Amino acid sequence: MKWLRNSKGLTLFEVLAVVVILAIVSMLSISIVTSATKQQIEQSAHNRDIKDLSFALKVITKDFRKSDNLITDSDDTTDPPTELHTLLLGDEIVSTYRLENNQIIRNSNGSDEVLAYKISKFTISGGAIEIISEDGQRATTDITQRRGK
């Protein structure tokens, strides 16, 4: 029993101080991890939107270069009216593009394919294509037809 009287232990105050310090360090660590995760998610979404814009421009450019004529009409059967951009090779339709529900939709061979999501503006006029996403990203290109009149 003599050795118990001479041993030194931790007081309640020392234990509480260690617990408080560990709690503060844990809170800071969790805050840093949460912030980094949030930033990574936002950056991934931004990169995905840019990838969608790039893919849409590549597909439209490819179809545009296959065609020799562009016809832009308005589809009044939808609310609001939708612009239809039809690319023709002679009398044959290469593809038709439209912006519907903030998506660029390509119709080729009778089937619809969504090329890009979260799009606020999409125009094809002459040899210029402009796509603007909901978060303000802008993709534009000027195209010259390889075939044509």
Image (spheres, rainbow, N blue to C red):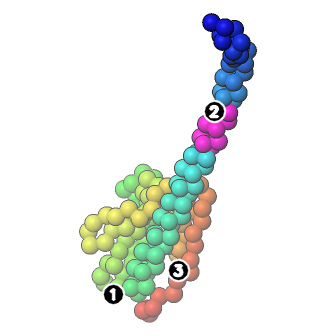
Q: Position of residue 143 (x, y in %)?
A: 52, 83
The residues tagged by marks 2 and 3 sit, at their Cα atoms, a distance apart of 59 Å
Image quarter of the N terminus: top right
Tell me the magenta residue range. 25-35
Residue that appears at 59% across and 40% down: 34
Q: Position of residue 81 (x, y in %)?
A: 44, 57
SS of the residue under disc 2: helix
* Left or right: 31 in relation to 14: left
SS of the residue under disc 3: loop
Q: Position of residue 35 (x, y in %)?
A: 63, 43
Q: Which residue is mark 1?
A: 90
Task: Assess whether residue 33 is covered by the magenta stretch.
Answer: yes
Count the numbered circles shown. Answer: 3
* Three-letter amino acid code of the residue under disc 3: Gly
Q: Nearer the viewer, residue 131 or 28?
A: 28
| Res 38 → quadrant | top right
Q: Which residue is mark 3?
A: 126
* Left or right: 24 in relation to 103: right
The residues tagged by marks 1 and 3 sit, at their Cα atoms, a distance apart of 17 Å
Query: Given contact means CB atoms under 8 Å apart, are the residues at marks 1 and 3 in contact?
Result: no
Q: Which residue is mark 2?
A: 26
State whether residue 113 is above or below residue 88.
Answer: above
* Three-letter amino acid code of the residue under disc 2: Ser
* Three-letter amino acid code of the residue under disc 1: Gly
* Left or right: 7 in relation to 75: right
Residue that appears at 33% across and 87% down: 90
Task: Assess whether residue 18 is covered by the magenta stretch.
Answer: no
